[in-house]
Amino acid sequence: MTALLEVTNLSKRFGGLQAVQDLSLTVNAGEIVGLIGPNGAGKSTVFNLINGVYPPDTGQVIFTGHDITGKQPHIVARHGLARAHQIVQPLTRLTVLENCTVGACFGRENLPLAQAHDVAREAASTVGLGDRLGALAGTLTTGGKKKLELARALAARPLLLLLDEVLAGLNPTETEGMIEIVRKIQQSGVAILMIEHIMRAIMSLSDRIVVLNVGRWLAEGSPQQVASDPEVITAYLGDTALINNLEERA
Amino acid sequence: MIGIFASVIDGVLVGAVYGLAAMGLTLIWGVMNVINLAHGAMIVLGMFMLYFLASVVGVPAYATIPLVAVVGFLFGVVLYWIAVHRVIGQPELMSLLSTFAVSMIVIGFGTALWTTSPYNVPVRVPGITWESYTFTGTHIMAAILAGVIAALLYLLLYHTRVGKAVRAVSGNREAAELTGIPTTQVLAMSFGLGVALAAVSGTLIATLFPFTILSGEAYQLKAFVVTVLGGLGNPAGALLGGIALGLLEGMATPFMPVSWIPVLEFVLFVFCLIAYPRGIFAFVR
Amino acid sequence: MRRPFFWLIALITILLAVVPYVTDDVQLRESLLLACVYIILASNLNLMIGYAGYVNFGNIVFFGLGGYICIYLVDTLHVHIVIAVLVAGIAVSALALLFGLGILRLRGAFFALATIGVNEAIKQLVANFEPWGGATGIYLSLDAYGQLGGPMQALWTTYLLIVLLTAASLFLSFFIKNSKFGLGLIAIGQNEDAAAVLGVPTAHYKAIAYSISAFLPAMAGGLYFFKSGIIEPGGAFNLSLSIEAIVMVMLGGQGTVIGPAVGAFVYEEIRGLLLTSETFSHFQLVIAGALLLLIVLFVPGGLIGYVHRRWPKTRRWLE
């Protein structure tokens, strides 16, 4: 089975900093792959390289068999790759519905306005914003904005969803809710590549985990394998709570 | 050939002043991500301050500079609080319009007060003669002063605590705030500094050429071209960019009617922005 | 068609067209004609400022260029005014598309400055272009009005055509705002990078918007200068009017459909009052600037924005 997303030998340097070095990973249809690593490991940069925000210095990104390396973000979006950012970017003066409609209109299916509204409504209810369709995006709480970011990406009916720390800044109840939403999304057939620091969540959600350290591939495997990998533990050394978490899972 | 040579040298001299004119603009942009469309108006105010102080009150021309700097600084701080403070976090559109509005108000008042007639401040400085060519004293003086002020700016930014604070806020405002720097005050001061630089450059330009209330526009365009050549937020680059522009003007003036020079500069401006968004002299930091 | 606002525009258009005829008031017609020109300029400018978030400082270049092309066609090539106007509109939007693809790569103030540069550069070019009368411009001979049945009749016909263009501008704003293209454009205006990641083809959409925003003003320019009988570089590429158009958009409410029209109308009234007063006529620019500053600082949504916030129900029908 050919992978949905195939990243090979990706590298990117910013001035004096080698942000990503020789990274390869794959995501198969329908699976959740977690991308973890200490702060500064280059995870968000990897996302930027995949969805076209920066062109990589070397390497290839192949999505559904198409070479999308270095292609512009809007073209990548058309191929069916959507992204929810770590720092949310709501279109503040538009309503929740309008925000999601943008996703539906310009995403994979390139829908006309009327149908896009329906898809948008659906996406909004999936994340639990179904009753706030008319609210201006700027008026939502942090949790609401995070949900909107996700709904917008969903509305594009993507094949692969890039989630960048979608749980950051949420209280425990919201976190539980969001974890459920991510599961629901996977069940609907969308593959997910997610960056997360909340170990408990990413360990329980992911089918596979890839560990990054200083821009390089460190380890890969099932959550259990990764949690008991001595190199991974060394990389996270200093964060005993994290290590306890990992060991708990093993 | 020598004629062109003289023209070129003169261009470099005047270019140093252009560089100074751009430094204020690039500083403000670098620190707070605001593009000051009132910059040209500030340059004009500097010009008229020279006229008022030198021709009306009788202060020696170059002695007005410290006074202009102080007045410019205070005016800039006030301007920050009136027109810029509220729009800092908002989309760029807003600060563009607010600074532009200030420009309209200042130029509007200026036109009412001084009309659009040309003003001139005669300044006598002996020139330097070489072969059969005389390099105008005022041009040499202006270039030297521009260099001195640029050096002072460098000292301020890199060898004082205040300068450190300014650079910290330029880099990352939130982080600077967290380390205890009163960022709003730093922003106000930086704006004041930028306006002071603009005003002083106006004063220097007024020692070189006659001017009207509408001269600001042309010099603002030059300042923008220089800023783009030198890379935004890069005062050293601005000086180099200014000299480069002066050089270009020096080379072009013998061959081109004066009214076409702004058109050439505009083309250069757009070309640089599209081809070299970080500035041709961005390597100078 | 089902939206109430559509009928509001239709009503305004009918009133504009009919009232001067019924009252046979030439002064009213002239005043309304100017208001219509302002509405056309502001509404189309709004596509860039209010929707796409790009400030086109030099927007008057479309008006002036359209005027020149049209006058030249009518005066030298004896083309019928309606055809000349259409050709002017198409030519200027085609040029705008070309230019747009280049300068729309620039963000924020750089784009704004580049548009001023475009205006000044074209003014300079035209002032040196002999076939278009150079610095003195073109004087339209009176028999040019023969094609419309003489000067008197021509003035009325021109007025009607301008009202048509005004209606077209409002309907255009309206349809774009409620279309997929408009949604993409507004997304760009809110956050261009986010829009790109969502799949909006930002570069294309911006260029198309820029080109569309040139079309009707160019035609309006053609009609306006045809009616005036004379065109010269300073009056055609008048940067002040360009700036005032921005003030009108902000005053009325950028991003709404009716806002720029309201702003244009209100501004024209204020301006008219100021020009008649001896003390204030010198301060026109100051007042416009002060107005712009106050709006940007305190009421960025303009008059209509204020109405929307105060009475949220109006959002539905007052677009």
Image (cartoon, rainbow, N blue to C red):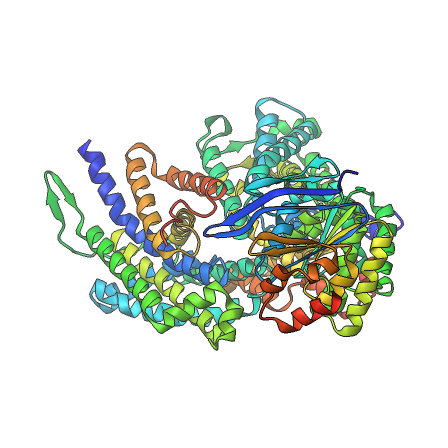
Q: Residue furthest right?
A: C2
Q: Nearer the viewer, residue C193 or A223?
A: A223
Quadrant of res C77: top right
Rendered residue at 59%/44% (across/down)? A10
Percent coordinates x, y for residue C43 in the rendering:
68, 49
Vertical comparison of A59 with C150: above or below: below
Rendered residue at 39%/55% (across/down)? B234
Can residue C1 be seen by looking at this rendering? yes
Q: Residue furthest top?
A: C77
Percent coordinates x, y for residue A64 in the rendering:
75, 38
Rendered residue at 29%/51% (across/down)? B16
Q: Nearer the viewer, residue B125 or A93?
A: A93
The quarter of the picture where the C terminus of chain C appears is: bottom right
Percent coordinates x, y for residue B257 in the rendering:
34, 35
The answer to whether residue C77 is left or right of residue B13 is right
Rendered residue at 76%/48% (across/down)? A160
The answer to whether residue C294 is left or right of residue A117 is left
Task: Tell me how many marks there are.
Answer: 0
Percent coordinates x, y for residue C317 in the rendering:
83, 58
Can residue A137 be seen by looking at this rendering? no
